[in-house]
Image (cartoon, rainbow, N blue to C red):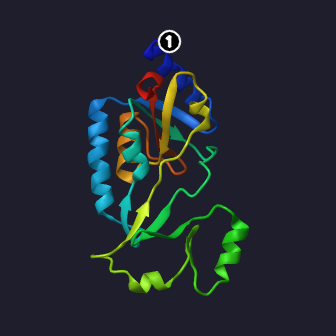
Amino acid sequence: MEHDDIIDNVKNSIIQMKGVGNTLLLNEEDREIIRELEKKADEMTLMGLGRGDNKGVKAVLKNDVIFAFTTNMDFCWPEGPNVILMHDGCVVGQDVDDEAKLEEVKSCKDKLVIGNIVIYDTSVLKKMDVKNNPLIVVLPPKPCADVEAVDMVCNVVLASPSPPSDEYLKEKMGLENLHGTGTFLLGFDFECSCE
C-alpha cells in the first residue's frame, strides 16, 4: 500500500471518531513551530503549580506523519490520567474523571482537589520550591485505538497540545477559538519503519 493511501485511511479513521471536526496534515514548518511553542509552554508556570512537560507532543513530533484535528464537547478524551503531577521523580497527583472518587477524595485531610486534579499528599506543596524544584505537570502520550486499527501504521500517539499550539493549529485551519473546541495531535509511523 502506498504511503498516500495509508495517510488517507488514517485521516478517514480520525474523521469518523465522535466529536472530531477538521483535520490538517502537518508539514515540516508546522512541526518546527509547534516544537518551539511547546518549548516555551514547558517553561511557563502551569496552573500555578509548576512547569510543564508535554511528553505527548514530544512523542508525536518524532512520528513520520502528524495530523492535527479539532474536537468539540462530544469528543471522548482518552482514558486518564491525562495530567500527571510529578515532584522529585515521583507521581504526587493526577486528573481524575470519576466524580464519586473526587467527592471521596475531598473528604481526606491530606489530599487536595483543584477542579478534577487530585494532589495525593499536601505536604509536597509545603516542600516544593516553585523556582528551584517545582512540580512538573506532565501531559502523557496517549493511545488511539481507532487509528491503531488502520493497516500499515504503528507507533500511534495521541497528544493534547499546549494553549499556544492549540491557537496556532486553529488559526492554521482558519477556525475561531470557540469555547468547547479543542485540538489534538496524532502521529504515526509507517509499518515498514518498525521492522
Quadrant (top left/top right/bottom left/bottom right) for the C terminus:
top left
The front one of 114 and 22 is 114
State left or right for residue 31 relative to residue 7.
left
Q: Please, what secondary structure does the residue beneath circle 1 have?
A: loop
Q: In the image, what residue occupies the spot 56% across and 31% down?
A: 14
> Which residue is farthest top?
1
Q: In the image, what residue occupies the spot 42% across and 86% down?
A: 126
State left or right for residue 38 relative to residue 114.
left
> Which residue is farthest right?
100
The front one of 18 and 38 is 38
Residue located beneath label 1 in the image: 1
* Rendered position, 1 above or below 100: above
> Which residue is farthest front?
195
Classify 10 Å Cα crowding around label 1: few (below 14), some (14-19), many (20 and above).
few
**Quadrant of residue 35 within the rendered picture:** top left
Q: Say how many tags the image has.
A: 1
The front one of 144 and 174 is 144
Q: Where is residue 43 in the image (x, y as percent from the top left)?
A: 29, 61
Q: Where is residue 12 in the image (x, y as percent from the top left)?
A: 56, 24
* Rendered position, 100 above or below 164: below
* Rendered position, 58 above or below 13: below
**Quadrant of residue 176 within the rendered picture:** top left
Q: Where is residue 42 in the image (x, y as percent from the top left)?
A: 32, 58
Q: In the image, what residue occupies the spot 27% across and 55% down?
A: 40
| Badge 1 amino acid | Met
The front one of 2 and 174 is 2
Q: Position of residue 31 (x, y in %)?
A: 31, 37
**Quadrant of residue 150 within the rendered picture:** top right
Q: In the image, what residue occupies the spot 37% across and 58% down?
A: 53
